[in-house]
Image (spheres, helix red, strand yellow):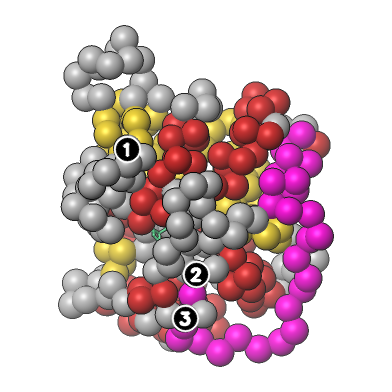
Amino acid sequence: MTKILMDMDPGIDDAAALSVALNHPDLDIKLVTTVAGNVTVDKTTINALKIINFFNQGDQVRVAAGAVQPLIKPFEDAARIHGESGMRGYDFTGSLPDPLEETAVEAMHRVIMASDEPITLVPTGSYTNVALLFSQYPEVKTKIEKIVAMGGTLGRGNMTSAAEFNVFTDPHAAQVMYQAGVPIVMVGLDVTHKALLTNETLQEIEGMNPAGKMLHDIISSDGDKNENGVAMHDVNTIFYLLHPEFMTTKDYWIDVQTEGPANGETVADIRGAYHDGKTNAQVCVDIDAQAFNDWFKEQVQAMKM
Ligand code: BDR
Ligand code: CA
């Protein structure tokens, strides 16, 4: 069983990633933390609680609210893609569990230090909480197995021609994370744009069970959906964790641009010219899109409320 800590900004694809992880027998979610990103952190916290409550896991999986804004850059949301609530398309009912009283950073520190086994961090929003955690409590680094992070791109961005949204939102935090000395798997647009969830997959999950209906409804509301399907960026982190054999990775040193027109760009030192040939990340560069769709359908089929 892999012990994971999910740090997210749900967000439709974050919600789908959380749904899969909550239901997977090989994953043990020790904590969910939230961050401002797709929408404000009060909304991303409510959205995480809605998903956890949907699967009746409010007693086991707790949520701690995190950073309300990036370290330095002004906050800009992505409500145009995810809706004003951050998770449009489905009417969640029932009263929600309370979030923890601790901040995300306090809760992350407590959970990581108390764990008898190393924890895998899975950030699928901007990395503000992760950067604050590493700055305030550097001792956690030795207790983190690795970071499997959605974000970045070696190719074209989705916010500017250079930058992907999670890194663009808080490039300074991303630079702190990439310089932390903790092993990182970068799950960026290079794979998430290749493995679209197809409209056929979406149609199939609708009738599978109540979870399939809920996921169908929120995913269908994603503002990026088109005739080919929709990228479920954050779900790729969970796919990598469970099935790395369906991805190709390359080791690079990643630096993050923190100013100017390329702000938020993840630059790979492909010639090994600037860091003495050292690397700080395994970058996912290819993915089996069919396997991703087949796996996602299997996950939904197995979901229980
Ligand atoms: C990332 O940006 C967010 O809008 C998504 O939730 C995902 O984490 C993709 O660029
Ligand atoms: Ca996200």
Percent of width and height locating residue 12:
45, 71
The residue labelled by disc 1 is: 257
Please give the name of the residue rendered at 54% of the width and 57% of the height, measured from the top-left corner: 69
Percent of width and height locating residue 101:
81, 60
- Mark number displayed over residue 84: 3
- Mark number displayed over residue 305: none
Check if mark 3's residue and mark 2's residue have beta carbons within 8 Å: yes
Q: Indicate whether residue 204 is drawn in magenta.
A: no
- Mark number displayed over residue 39: 2
Local SS, label 3: loop
Is there any visible trace of residue 277 in the rendered image? Answer: yes
Q: Which residues are magenta?
A: 86-113
Amino acid at the residue labelled 3: Glu
- In this rendering, position of residue 101 left or right of residue 87: right
Amino acid at the residue labelled 1: Gln
Q: Is mark 3 within 8 Å of ligand 1?
A: no
Local SS, label 1: loop
Please give the name of the residue rendered at 61% of the width and 55% of the height, measured from the top-left corner: 67
Please give the name of the residue rendered at 71% of the width and 58% of the height, measured from the top-left corner: 64
**Are there few (<14), some (14-19), or many (20+) residues within 10 Å of tag 1?**
many
